[in-house]
């Protein structure tokens, strides 16, 4: 049977945006950029102690021309413009879409220059216009998210509709599909099909889950009108809809999910949705922390029969907490239930506060598509893959019902964890679990280690910091060496010379040697990090880039 493809409203929106552009092929890569924090008052040569705003008679370190590394200063607009111009020159011909996870205004940390909403809007408008010029004008979709410093007062936003969502709907008009206008006006969140009928991105408003937002109620079970609950109801509907169409989804947002950062009830609901739709969600991408790391969401987090975890020591760093979490993963991995885990990726920031400017380029699997044009809806391989997903979906629902004696107690009865009884969609062959079409394959992290050296006469440079790929994946193997259309995971011209050589056997740039970024691969890395001290040293080095541990 031949099925005719009928574009949906969001397909039509994309087609309208790009109708005058030549069709772009899929490269199997995308960019994640976050926390730019441009500061219109940044003054090169000013005192670092003044947050790089004014001179000081007391001396001390001075603000750099392109930014001040390892400081409490935000980014000069010069750094933002250079970064996006660099991406324009070197990467726009190599990527398919952009995930942009918030915070496009300075921090409010100078009493002499109080911040206002108008200033925040102006900064966001400037960054958005630059994003439009660099990416959208070339047919590259951009998916923005609202950050805690993109509003005033910072961290605090009430239920919508409100003037902030109205203003951002104007600022981000080019990025938000008309089909998502209502949800964005209501709560600052939206979804978009970045590869029509195949891959979507869901941009969350994580501030509705964030403990520091005192304008919301925290997703309490008996408060269905709480904006966090309304948001998670919407997220559930989106995931159900995309799953019914055999699509895959990236979940994106600003504040990464954690028990420490989210209201407890919001966190439990979020974890449950991620576990329930594990066969649909490719991964989670966030910013906010300005620290490069990954973390795990675990089914034990929502199991009310599990003993409550003790409070982490106040002096513990993020690194310490992650290694402690990784040490609790049961072994051997061959016997582990991978359907009990979700991986969260948190990217480093452009702002050199408190580390160094950085961005990330992911590779993902497009093998098997007969055409790599963006509009792959009618591709035979995609249709065959979707049919297989449909067949497996009928057999892979697993109801997680368990004895919950604590739910008989009044203190637990009206909590979300006592009401999770819907089937989980677990599939060991889904792209998040097994390397297949749309699976994330790995990423390359780029940074600017010599930021303090650059000035009017010395142009900045981004350099490769590390990659997750094994060296063996960098070049064609013997079977494919003679082919002319080999898809390199990363363009060789943008990598150091030692990685361009086909027969390299060892490199400091490839310490993790991950075959892909599926859940089993991440859990393998987590267990190795818990045991191997040398790998821990590298992981910590990438987290803090030589700066102070937090």
Image: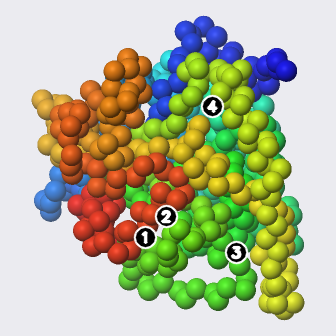
Disc 4 versus disc 3: distance between alpha carbons? 31 Å
Query: Judging from the image, what secondary structure is the residue with disc 4 in?
Result: strand
The residue lying at 82 percent from left, 75 percent from top is 401
Front of the two marks 3 and 2: 2
User: Is residue 364 in view?
Assistant: yes
The residue lying at 65 percent from left, 48 percent from top is 430
Frontmost residue, 1 versus 492: 1
Q: Position of residue 21 (x, y in %)?
A: 56, 10
Q: Which residue lies furthest to the front in this view?
A: 479
Q: Which of marks 4 and 3 is nearer the N terminus?
A: 4
Q: Earlier in the sequence, mark 2 or mark 4?
A: 4
Report the disc number at residue 194.
4
Frontmost residue, 149 versus 403: 403
Q: Earlier in the sequence, mark 1 or mark 3?
A: 3
Query: Judging from the image, what secondary structure is the residue with disc 3 in?
Result: helix
The residue lying at 77 percent from left, 56 percent from top is 396
Q: Name the residue under label 1.
A: 527
| Mark 1 and mark 2 residues within 8 Å of each other at the beta carbon | yes
């Amino acid at each position: 049977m031949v099925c005719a493809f009928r574009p949906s409203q969001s397909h039509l929106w994309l087609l309208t945006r790009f109708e005058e552009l030549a069709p772009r092929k899929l490269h199997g890569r995308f960019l994640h950029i976050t926390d730019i924090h441009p500061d219109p008052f940044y003054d090169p040569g000013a005192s670092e102690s003044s947050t790089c705003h004014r001179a000081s008679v007391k001396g001390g370190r001075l603000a750099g021309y392109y930014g001040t590394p390892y400081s409490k200063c935000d980014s000069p607009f010069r750094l933002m413009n250079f970064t996006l111009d660099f991406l324009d020159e070197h990467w726009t011909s190599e990527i398919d879409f952009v995930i942009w996870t918030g915070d496009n205004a300075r921090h409010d940390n100078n009493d002499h220059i109080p911040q206002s909403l108008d200033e925040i809007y102006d900064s966001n408008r400037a960054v958005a216009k630059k994003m439009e010029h660099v990416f959208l004008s070339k047919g590259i979709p951009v998916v923005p998210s609202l950050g805690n410093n993109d509003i005033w007062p910072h961290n605090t936003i009430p239920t919508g509709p409100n003037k902030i969502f109205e203003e951002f709907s104007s600022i981000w008009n080019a990025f938000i599909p008309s089909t998502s206008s209502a949800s964005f006006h209501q709560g600052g969140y939206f979804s978009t099909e970045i590869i029509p009928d195949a891959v979507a991105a869901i941009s969350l408003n994580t501030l509705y889950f964030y403990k520091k937002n005192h304008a919301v109620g925290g997703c309490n079970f008996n408060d269905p009108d709480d904006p966090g609950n309304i948001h998670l109801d919407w997220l559930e509907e989106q995931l159900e809809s995309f799953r019914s169409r055999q699509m895959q989804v990236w979940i994106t947002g600003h504040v990464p999910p954690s028990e420490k950062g989210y209201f407890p009830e919001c966190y439990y609901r979020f974890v449950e949705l991620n576990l329930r739709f594990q066969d649909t969600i490719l991964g989670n991408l966030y910013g906010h922390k300005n620290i490069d790391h990954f973390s795990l969401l675990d089914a034990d987090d929502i199991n009310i029969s599990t003993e409550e975890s003790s409070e982490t020591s106040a002096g513990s760093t993020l690194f310490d907490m992650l290694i402690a979490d990784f040490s609790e993963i049961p072994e051997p991995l061959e016997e582990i239930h991978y359907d009990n885990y979700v991986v969260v990726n948190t990217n480093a920031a452009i702002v050199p506060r408190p580390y160094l400017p950085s961005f990330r380029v992911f590779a993902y699997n497009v093998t098997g598509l007969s055409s790599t044009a963006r509009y792959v809806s009618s591709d035979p391989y995609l249709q065959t893959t979707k049919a297989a997903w449909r067949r497996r979906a009928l057999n892979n629902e697993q109801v997680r019902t368990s004895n919950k004696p604590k739910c008989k107690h009044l203190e637990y009865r009206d909590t979300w964890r006592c009401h999770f009884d819907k089937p989980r969609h677990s599939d060991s062959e889904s792209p998040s679990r097994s390397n297949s079409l749309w699976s994330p394959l790995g990423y390359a992290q780029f940074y600017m280690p010599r930021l303090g050296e650059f000035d009017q006469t010395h142009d900045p440079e981004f350099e490769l910091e590390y990659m997750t790929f094994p060296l063996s994946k960098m070049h064609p193997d013997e079977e494919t060496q003679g082919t002319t259309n080999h898809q390199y995971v990363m363009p060789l011209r943008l990598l150091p010379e030692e990685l361009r050589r086909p027969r390299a056997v060892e490199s400091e740039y490839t310490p993790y040697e991950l075959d892909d970024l599926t859940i089993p691969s991440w859990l393998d890395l987590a267990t190795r990090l818990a045991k191997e001290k040398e790998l821990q040293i590298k992981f910590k080095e990438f987290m803090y880039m030589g700066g102070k541990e937090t």
